[in-house]
Image (cartoon, rainbow, N blue to C red):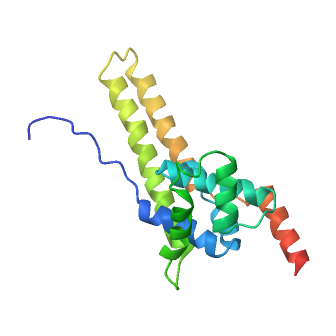
Amino acid sequence: MDGTIHAPVIPQDREAEALVLGSILRSRDLLLKVQEFLRADDFYSQAHLHIFQTMLEMSDKLRDIDHFTLSDALKRKGILEEVGGMSYIAELEDLVPASASVEEYARIVREKAMLRKVVEVTQGILQTANGRVEDAEKFADEAERRLFEVTQRYFRTSSKPIRTLVKDYIKKLEY
């Protein structure tokens, strides 16, 4: 071993991200399932982050989500071409197999996001440790706190956000 610290491979799965988005395009109701535990910043691909964020915004406004309405919303934001254009949005829906499991795809996206955050935090800890640490105990406590924050974000058991509860209730009233 030469002692060289190599840059870590960035954990991500663009295919799982695309499958989450395509699943939502096939069935808007799936957004309610995944938004309980997946955030836009969990997506590694900036295009996918923007697409998911736009889907959330459309859902908040109770707008239908399909490749046409999503493309229109992205166009209004001036980012349609940046995310791959209308053809990419249509392609997302076509990627999803008939027996899709959006929860499994979202779990993969969330897991990769957590690993990226752990890498980010540990790189910061390493950088600080290689610098000047005046109080090792205080430094260790801070490092532990930062890693704990990551685990709390990704492993906490929480109830549904109020907006999700309200949307679920409205949806039940509509049927």
Q: Residue at x 81, y 62 (%)?
A: 62
- Name the residue nearer the viewer: 62 or 86: 86
Residue, far left = 1
Q: Residue at x 52, y 64 (%)?
A: 87
Q: Quadrant of the N terminus?
A: top left
Residue 152 point in image, percent of width and height: 57, 48
Q: Quadrant of residue 85?
A: bottom right
Q: Is residue 88 above or below residue 141?
A: below
Judged left or right of residue 22, residue 143 is left
Residue 86 point in image, percent of width and height: 57, 61
Residue, far bottom = 98
Residue 72 point in image, percent of width and height: 68, 57
Q: Residue at x 8, y 37 (%)?
A: 2
Residue, far right = 173
Q: Quadrant of the C terminus?
A: bottom right
Residue 168 point in image, percent of width and height: 81, 69
Q: Is residue 107 above or below residue 128?
A: below
Q: Residue at x 34, y 26 (%)?
A: 127
Judged left or right of residue 174, residue 126 is left
- Name the residue nearer the viewer: 138 or 50: 50
Q: Is residue 12 above or below residue 132?
A: below
